[in-house]
Image (cartoon, helix red, strand yellow):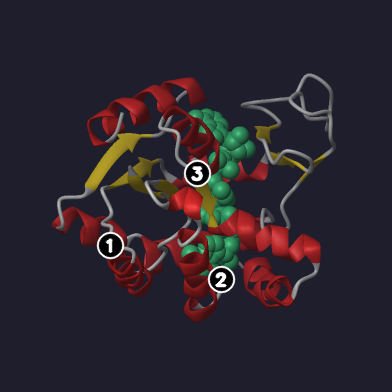
Amino acid sequence: MRLVLVGPPGAGKGTQAEFIAERFSIPKISTGDIFRANVSGGTELGKLAKSFMDAGDLVPDEVTIAMVRDRLGEPDAATGFLLDGFPRNVPQAYELDSILGDLGAVLDVVLELEVDSEEVVRRLSGRRTCRGCGKIWHVEFDPTSKDNICDRCGSELFQRDDDKAETIANRLVEYAEKTAPLVDFYGAQGKLVGIDATGPVEDVTVRAIDALRSYGG
Ligand code: AP5
Ligand code: MG
């Protein structure tokens, strides 16, 4: 299955991507995670991306598209993948079609996670991420048993630099202006499936897997 997850910041894309990728045995490819790994590693790409990410703006298309083209050309993505955070505007969606065309493949489905903006602000302001394994937690909705320590691997948790109130506000504006048009774009192609992404994480996972079952395994 070749799948794109779309939804506003804090919709739960990263949270659900883990479960969906495991269930359908496909690699999870998150452009946000790749940028953050580059920022931590101090690479040139990380230095370039950081200023855009800290402002809540999109990283320029040419950089992002080249990165995704490389990643989708890797062997583990040959028979399927889950893209989390790409495409994020209509030009990127056209580029994805072109990348897949070059690989002799087509996108199967786009899963939209639907949540309102009050809920995303609540989710983002309490989000914590594990420095070791990357697992996503929430201080209120999905807390660890010990403060700031990951239950899965024992590493320390951190708060993302872009989860500050003013950056969150700009990320939501960017989403509404640039990413939300993808809903109509993929809807017109008959590739869009939307699910209610509110309620407990496990319930959202069940809805997601049900919605995707007919596309692969
Ligand atoms: P990215 O990392 O993709 O961030 P985002 O789209 O803003 O989305 P988030 O990761 O913030 O939210 P999420 O939907 O993954 O939610 P999560 O599962 O963590 O991008 C970051 C930046 O990188 C961008 O701003 C941009 O600068 C750059 N970038 C990335 N891709 C790009 C591209 N293609 N082009 C250009 N630039 C790009 O959940 C959030 C919280 O809610 C967690 O704490 C979680 O525990 C909790 N939670 C999840 N589900 C539930 C639930 N059901 N109930 C209660 N709490 C829940
Ligand atoms: Mg995410």
- Tell me which residue sits at (76%, 23%) in the image: 151
The residues bearing labels 1 and 2 have C-alpha atoms spaced at a distance of 32 Å
Residue 168 visible? The answer is no
Mark 2 closeness class: few <14, some 14–19, many ≥20 residues within 10 Å: some
The nearer-to-camera label among 2 and 3 is 3
Q: x and y percent of residue 142 in the render?
A: 64, 26
**Count of labels in the image:** 3
Which quadrant, please, contains the N terminus? top left
The residue pinned by badge 1 equals 104
* SS for callout 3: loop
- Tell me which residue sits at (42%, 31%) in the image: 198
Mark 3 closeness class: few <14, some 14–19, many ≥20 residues within 10 Å: many
- Asked which quadrant contains residue 93, the reply is bottom left
The nearer-to-camera label among 1 and 3 is 1
The residue pinned by badge 2 equals 57
The mark nearer the N terminus, 1 or 2, is 2
Q: Amino acid at mark 3?
A: Pro
Please tell me which residue lies in front, 52 or 174.
52
Q: Amino acid at mark 1?
A: Gly
Please tell me which residue lies in front, 143 or 150.
150
Q: Is residue 215 left or right of residue 73?
A: left
Which mark, residue 27? 3
The residues bearing labels 2 and 3 have C-alpha atoms spaced at a distance of 26 Å
The residues bearing labels 1 and 3 have C-alpha atoms spaced at a distance of 18 Å
Please tell me which residue lies in front, 121 or 2.
2
Q: Is residue 147 left or right of residue 165?
A: right
